Amino acid sequence: MKITVLYFARLREALRREHEILDVAPDVATVAHLRAWLVARGDPWSSAFTEVKRIRAAVDQATASDSTPLHEGAEVAFFPPVTGG
Amino acid sequence: MPVRVQREDFDAGAEIARLRKDDPKIGAVAAFIGVARDVNDGEMVGTLTLEHYPGMTERALEQICAQAKERWKVAEVLVVHRVGELRPTDQIVLVAVSGGHRGEAFAACEFVMDYLKTDAPFWKKESTAGGERWVDARDSDDLARARWKETNSR
């Protein structure tokens, strides 16, 4: 299953990348699964996902929770709490 | 377009004139302008750089505006938010709401701003004498948003 993952702000800097295209097994079925899969890859994901606090997620540009399902071609974003305005 | 994300500055007077469209039913316009401050968390700020998530930002802002229009009897809701590098005294964001009466316009304007603060994917980074730092989200912003769930209107 191909997924595009985007990173923003502090998390983007910690990972030294804005996005990546991943090919994950179908059992990576939710946001929580994907996060665990990324952390299991080791550094820099494992340290970045620990050091950056309260990481939020979006799927297909809509706010997501841990249980939000993924699908082929999904656009998943991880980012710290927002600070606009 | 009720929602714009742009690098350029904005002219609030011109934006409000466009929002009113010389509509004689408009009796009130409430507007908020967020401005870059020179001091944050006790340190002088040199530049403020705003990053956003293109696509999701516009969608989130449009949803917030739609919620405001559903909740209050208002005519138009406008959000203009800047991104890129800004300096103290630069304008960051404009929220303007037109309607028949001030009560709805004030409430909808504050609602949009409170939701923008917690739901729209923008991130601020400051440069100070001590180096660059990402601005942390404030608990007070979450509390400001939560107030709108307790009451139907204010």
Image (tube, coloured by chain):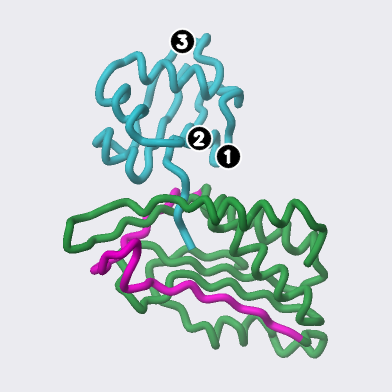
Chain colours: A cyan, B green
Same chain letter for marks 3 and 1: yes
- Stretch in magenta: B28-55
The earlier-in-sequence mark between 3 and 1 is 3
Does B4 appear in magenta?
A: no
Q: Do the CB atoms of the residues marked 1 and 2 lie less than 8 Å apart?
A: yes
Does B33 appear in magenta?
A: yes
Residue type for callout 1: Thr
The residue beneath circle 3 is: A25
Q: Give the CA separation, mark 1 to mark 2.
A: 6 Å
Q: Chain of mark 3?
A: A
Q: Nearer the viewer, mark 3 or mark 1?
A: 1
Q: Chain of mark 1?
A: A
User: Which residue is found at the position 32% from the left and 51% from the top?
Assistant: B134
Residue type for callout 3: Ala
Q: Quadrant of residue B76?
A: bottom right
User: Which residue is found at the position 80% from the left and 82% from the top?
Assistant: B101
The residue beneath circle 2 is: A57
Q: Pick out the residue farthest to the front.
A: B42
Judged left or right of residue A85, residue B65 is right
Q: Residues within 10 Å of mark 1 (few under 14, many from 20)?
A: some
Residue A34 x/y as whole percent: 46, 20
Q: Secondary structure at mark 2?
A: strand
Tell which of B18 and A82 is nearer to you. Answer: A82
Residue type for callout 2: Ala
Residue A50 x/y as whole percent: 35, 27
